[in-house]
Image: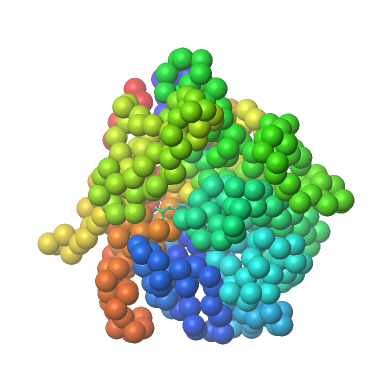
Amino acid sequence: MHYRNDPKFPEGFLWGASSSAWQVEGGVADGGRSESIIDINSRTKVPFADNSIAADHYHHYLEDVELMAECGFTSYRFSLSWSRIIPAADRKVNPEGIAFYNNLINALLERGITPIVTLYHYDMPVWVKEKCGGWMDRSIIDEFEYYCKVCYENFGDRVKYWLSINEQNMQIIYGYWLGLADSEDWFRDQWKMNHIMNLCHAKAVNLCHEMVEGGLIGPVPGMVPIYPESCRPLDQIAAMNAEEFTEKIWNDTYAYGTYSNFLKKYWEKNDIDPGILPGDMELIASAKIDYFAVNCYRSNVAKDAPLDSEQKAYLLNSTGVKGNFQFPVVPGEYALTRNPFVEYTDWDWEIDPSSLRYTLRYMHDHYHLPMIITENGFGAHESKGADGKVHDDYRINFLRENIYQVGLAIEDGCEVWGYNPWSFTDLLSTGNGIAKRYGLVYIDVTDDELNRAKDASDLSLARIKKDSFYWYSKLIKSNGTDWGEDMSGR
Ligand code: BGP
């Protein structure tokens, strides 16, 4: 659909931004927090940057919340650190961890900013890994349920919007990249792990509904819409295969509470036992989600991959130098390939604002649930200019075009209640340190400085509002009408 007028955002639409604990907080040894697996990865894996300090939000949270309020935020999506709340296997709740999040939540609410809280965003405590073997052992279900209970008990009186597990699909698909794939037969074991994660998600959903008065909860799939390379019928089927194996399998289970026939056939043909025990499917079916929280940055293109094609792994760009990556080929299923109609970022991510409208339409058509955007954004190399400021016109363009597409999706009939791009301040990228910056606010630090510093007091870590901060502020204070330029004909 093309429309003659600019789209309208509903009254009370939540405008904010997004972060996760391990990427923004720092203070990893402060306030009684214990170590998480991602801390170890961030110190030992290249090109992760040490997350001991990150954006030091743990010590700067009040300044950060003040800046959010100045910008005009009405929401902020962040995650809780399990290691900060329950630091050890004895299950003792850490009062300092609870106090930190209480202070953050209260500071937000006092400024009219609605907290939207993720329970789990990639940061498993070391003790959980040691005690339960991570997501691979069913004993984690009890631990996770207990953790959720503690979170709802302590914050559920004020936090009403909850998110279960961030990008479960990406954690399974990129198991090697994110450090989950440490089993000998990952090809099969990933489905066991995925099943256990589904059970944990289901526990989180049910418990939220039981314990939080007026509480709502949803999953956070990482969505990358898949377009077929051509109108060749085989490319269309390949696009459907890629869609199944990268996102649909997960979303179907969240929304319908069962595993799809497509997935069950795949397991049968590949001799995969996902470890389903009596009662599991009843639990999964009982967990009724209230919405989908959608992360979407880009799109992919798929083409047919015959059975005899050469298998290739998906190697993501971890340097920020264009062309340093490899598209995957999965023989018999699909191959991903370049899209000649879009530009690419320095990390070879497609710059495709329509992907957001496509995703919202797709999710709406399949699941008929409300949606909130919990991630979207533009990662770039950035530094301060001679004037001490950061002129990120490329990010303004990206956000403008993407948010406009959210508006169009709303005009198309999708129920969307908020937009929270990645990220408010710069923070650590999942695999690229702080060199890949997403923030509306610049953090004055580099990866080298973060890796060298003994503690945060060695560093400036000054918060500098980028040009995108001012542009976004105008747009959200006008509830999505002040675009900063004429948008007609988009
Ligand atoms: C999402 C993750 C975030 C964030 C973002 C950007 O998948 O949920 O944690 O990192 O991607 O990705 P990256 O940091 O790799 O650029």
Task: Name which residue lies at 50% across and 83% down.
Answer: 30
Task: Name which residue lies at 28% across and 65% down.
Answer: 464
Task: Name which residue lies at 51% across and 15% down.
Answer: 233
Query: Closest to the observer: 4 or 462?
Result: 462
- Would you say residue 8 is visible in this rendering? no
- Would you say residue 423 is visible in this rendering? yes
Tell me residue 305's x, y (percent): 47, 27
Which residue extends farthest front?
Answer: 308
Query: Closest to the observer: 362 or 333?
Result: 333
- From the viewer's perspective, is residue 254 above or below residue 122? above
Query: Closest to the observer: 322 or 289?
Result: 322
- Relative horizontal placement of residue 397, taking residue 407 as reference (left or right): left
The image shows a total of numbered marks equal to 0
Q: How is the image coloured?
A: rainbow
Task: Name which residue lies at 27% across and 71% down.
Answer: 448
Corner quadrant of residue 109: bottom right
Tell me residue 9's x, y (percent): 50, 37
- From the viewer's perspective, is residue 349 above or below residue 43? above
Which residue extends farthest right?
Answer: 278
Tell me residue 157's x, y (percent): 71, 66
- From the viewer's perspective, is residue 354 above or below residue 398? above
